[in-house]
Amino acid sequence: MNENNIVWLRNANIYQGNSLILSDVNMEVRKGEMVYLIGKTGSGKSSLLKTLYGDLYLKEGEGHIAGFNLKDLTWKKVPLMRRNLGIIFQDFRLLSDRNVFSNLEFVLKAIGWTDKAKMKEKIESVLSKVGLRGKGFKMPHEMSGGEQQRVDIARALLNNPKLIIADEPTGNLDPETTDEIMQLLLTICKEYNTAMVMATHDYTILQKYPGRIVRIEQGKLVELTAAGYPG
Ligand SMILES: Nc1ncnc2c1ncn2[C@@H]1O[C@H](COP(=O)(O)OP(=O)(O)OP(=O)(O)O)[C@@H](O)[C@H]1O
């Protein structure tokens, strides 16, 4: 494994229960690199991403994520590893019973922050990064899908992540909002040299925003050249 790799998988077999979903996965992502993961519905994109953020245990093969060995990853260690990651979902997954500020404060408290003033400062800084300065009082249901996705990104940034794992982050958004969110994500990645692995169905994203493309085909990972993507 090279120290420039933030993701390194070797001969990994990925299971959901007893079903083998992906076999012999070899994957490397360098620091600061942008990688798209494509493949048909049900091909295993989410399963692969879940393995990267420790939601699925790696039973067979080897894997290192942000310096953590997936084979040594007990449930206790998963939160520690996730402190190095930003995870973004298609459906935002904000807590609906509290406002944006409290959503973000909840995460900071969960990772051990206690100083109120420092938490406020951090929350304001990530909210302004995503263009939502002063919007902490809003409830999730009072926001558009694009705004909720910005909150989701702000939440991911609380960790100063080395790697962002995004599972179809624009899947619920219209084309214009998709563009805004992609530009925001790429600006953030560039500014902090953050790597990103993004699952997507949206080929216009691949055309507009260059990155390395990896496709899942019949249970295997296939690396495509920049010009090799379909559509
Ligand atoms: N929790 C689970 N338990 C059992 N099987 C599952 C579970 N989650 C997913 N699967 C199965 O694993 C396979 C891969 O699913 P996965 O969600 O990883 O695909 P995907 O490529 O992300 O699909 P989509 O594009 O629709 O999100 C599918 O056959 C699915 O039915």
Image (cartoon, helix red, strand yellow):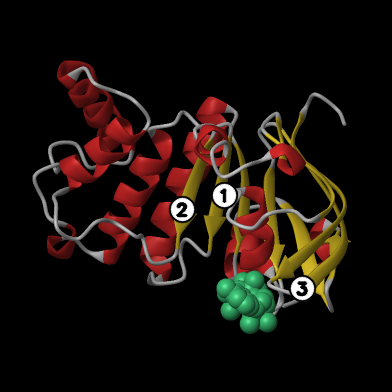
Residue type at tag 3: Ile
* Rendered image: mark on residue 144: none
Q: Disc 1, disc 2: CB below 8 Å?
A: yes
Mark in front: 1 vs 3: 3
The residue identified by callout 3 is 21
The residue identified by callout 1 is 165
Where is residue 26 shown, x and y percent of the image?
Answer: 87, 52
- Residue drawn at the location 82% of the way across and 62% of the way down: 227
How far apart in space, not on screen, are marks 1 and 2 (Cα)? 6 Å
Q: Disc 1, disc 3: CB below 8 Å?
A: no
Residue type at tag 2: Ile
Report helix, strand or loop for mark 3.
Answer: strand
Where is residue 135 shown, x and y percent of the image?
Answer: 14, 43
Mark 1 or mark 3: name the one nearer the start of the chain. 3
Report helix, strand or loop for mark 1.
Answer: strand
Where is residue 8 shown, x and y percent of the image?
Answer: 80, 41
The quarter of the image holding the C terminus is: bottom right
196 relative to 62 in the view: left or right? left
- Residue drawn at the location 21% of the way across and 17% of the way down: 115
* Residue 221 visible in rendering: no
Q: How many marks?
A: 3
Quadrant hosting ligand 1: bottom right
How far apart in space, not on screen, are marks 1 and 3 (Cα)? 19 Å
Where is residue 134 shown, x and y percent of the image?
Answer: 12, 37
Mark in front: 2 vs 3: 3
Mark 1 or mark 2: name the one nearer the start of the chain. 2
* Rendered image: mark on residue 88: 2
- Residue drawn at the location 30% of the way across and 23% of the way down: 113
Residue type at tag 1: Ile
